[in-house]
Image (cartoon, rainbow, N blue to C red):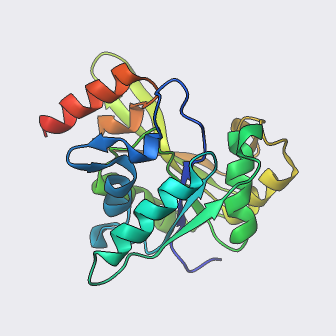
Amino acid sequence: MSADPPLVVVLAAGASRRLGQPKALCRIGGTTALEGLVERALAPSTGLRDLVVVTGRHHAEIAEVVARANASRSEPLHVRVLENADWARGRTGSFARAVRARPDRDLLLAPIDVPRVASATFAALQRAWRDAGRAPRGWLACAHVGASRGRRFGHPIVIGRELARDALALDPDAPLRELRDQAAPLAGVDVDDPTILEDLDTPDDLARLRELEAER
C-alpha cells in the first residue's frame, strides 16, 4: 500500500484553439487559472503535498509562470512541470507522461478545464481515498448532488497507481474511461462543490467563470 497521498496531476497540454489563449494562463479572479488551481490543491487543509503540470503546446509560457510564482513565495510549492512533446496525439498521452514520471504514485487528476475546484473538495477526495485503503487499482470520483439534475460526477478524480500504469498501454487519444472500466473498486464521494462540473473551453465559458468567481 502506498503511504503517500496522491500526486496531483494538472493536465494543461492542449492548444486551447476554441478559447484562443492558453487555458492555464487565463486570468480568473485576479490570478491565472493554473495558479489558483495549484494554490487550492496544495492548501495545507487538503493533505496533498506535491503536484505536476503536464504541458504541451504552451510549455514555455506555463513553465515561466510556475517558476515566477514559486520565486515570489517564501516557501515554494512542490510543483514540477513535465513537457509532453506528443501533446497533439491526445490527452491520455499527457496522463501517461505523468505516470512515467512517477509510476509508484496514486494520481489525483485535475484538468485545467476545471480550474475553480475548492480546497475542500481536494481534501474530501484525499480523505476518502485514504479511508478506503488506497486501492492500487481503484478509481474515486467526486460528485455533486443538485436539486434538478441529481447526482453528477465531475473532476478531480483519483486513480490508483497500478490502474494508472495501464494508461501506458493505451493509445494517446483513447478515452480515460477505458481505465475506469477496469477499476476495482469504482467509487464516488459527494461534495458540496458545483465547480467540479464546470468546463473552460470557449470565450463564453471564460466570461461565465469570471462572473462566478466575482460572486464568491
Numbered circles on residues, count? 0
Depicted 18 relative to depicted 62: above or below: above
Report the side of 34 relative to 93 (left or right): left
Report the side of 11 relative to 213 (left or right): right
Residue for point 87% across, 51% down: 169
Foreground: 196 or 182? 196
Q: Residue 34 location, x and y as percent?
A: 40, 52
Residue for point 45% across, 40% down: 23
Residue for point 28% across, 75% down: 72
Foreground: 161 or 204? 204
Report the side of 7 relative to 122 (left or right): right
Instruction: Name the quadrant of the C terminus.
Output: top left
Q: Residue 210 location, x and y as percent?
A: 24, 33
Depicted 184 relative to depicted 161: above or below: above
Depicted 36 relative to depicted 69: above or below: above
Residue 88 shows up from this direction? yes
